[in-house]
Image: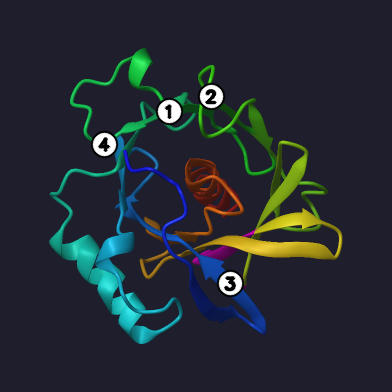
Amino acid sequence: MRDYAFERTRTAESLGDTSFDYTHILFISPHHYNTSEIKIWDITDSVSSPLGSEDFKEETEYFGQAHSDETPTWIIHNPGLSKDKALHPGRVTYPTEDTIITTWRPSTWSAGKNAFDFPPNSPHCSHGLVMERPRWYKNRAETFVQDSMEYSWRWEGHSGRKFTLWKGYGDRKIPVAQYKSPLRLAVMGGTVVVNADEVDVVVALITCVANLLKNKQAK
């Protein structure tokens, strides 16, 4: 697994007037509820165009079509819709408890909670996380707290194809990750850009995938 020290920062004008710095670009394989393995690639070094451009879209879509047989950076093992899931390094042929990066207990309905556990001494998070929807009947945000800092995935529009992770409280929020999918609404998967200076890449990834499932539960 690659070292998540700062590599480079790119800026995209894709959030209205808000500039969004990001260091990593991830590609989540197309999947459904019952897909047994959800594959994720870190494609940062394969994409040169800025987020929001047509070239960026073409480069990321091309990767998904042409490189799907390559060894992924991570794999989420999914034994079933309501069963616990686990994230492992993609290079591991036979996953065990020793190779678990994080486990995920999914919610069973659209207003439920997702819970994430990390091994002792995890470099990604020092405690368990719970992601839930505050005042779920009034908004589509999914919020969790890591190291006393609040993060919220917020949907943009009603298509379910784009949402942004915001960090901070009240009016002092900054965007730190963003998901976008070119796929049909029946299929989950797409591109995630992450600012690793502001949020752990694995935390952003696993909460993003959980948010995808929650969105499908709401439909």
Location of residue 85 with respect to 72 vertically, above or below: above
Work out how far the residue at label 2 is from the one at label 3, CA to CA, in angstroms: 28 Å
Residue 20 tag number: 3
Q: Name the quarter where the C terminus is drawn.
A: bottom right
Looking at the picture, how far across and down is residue 27, in whole percent?
A: 34, 57
For disc 3, the neighbor class at 10 Å (few under 14, some 14 to 19, many from 20) is many
Q: Residue at x 86, y 59 (%)?
A: 170
Q: Earlier in the sequence, mark 1 or mark 4?
A: 4
Work out how far the residue at label 3 is from the one at label 4, CA to CA, in angstroms: 28 Å
Camera sees residue 186 = no
Residue type at the position of mark 1: Ile
Work out how far the residue at label 2 is from the one at label 1, CA to CA, in angstroms: 7 Å
The segment highlighted magenta reads 157-165
Work out how far the residue at label 1 is from the one at label 4, CA to CA, in angstroms: 11 Å
Determine whether the residue tagged by mark 3 lies in a helix, strand or loop.
Answer: strand
Q: Name the quarter where the N terminus is drawn.
A: top left
- Contact? badges 3 and 4 (CB < 8 Å): no
Determine whether the residue tagged by mark 4 lies in a helix, strand or loop.
Answer: loop
Location of residue 207 with respect to 27 vertically, above or below: above
Camera sees residue 141 = yes
Residue type at the position of mark 4: Gly
Q: Is residue 161 magenta?
A: yes
> In the figure, residue 73 lies in which quadrant?
top left
Q: Which residue is mark 2?
A: 118
Q: Residue at x 36, y 47 (%)?
A: 32
- Contact? badges 2 and 1 (CB < 8 Å): yes
Determine whether the residue tagged by mark 2 lies in a helix, strand or loop.
Answer: loop
Q: Which residue is mark 1?
A: 101
Location of residue 146 with respect to 49 vertically, above or below: above
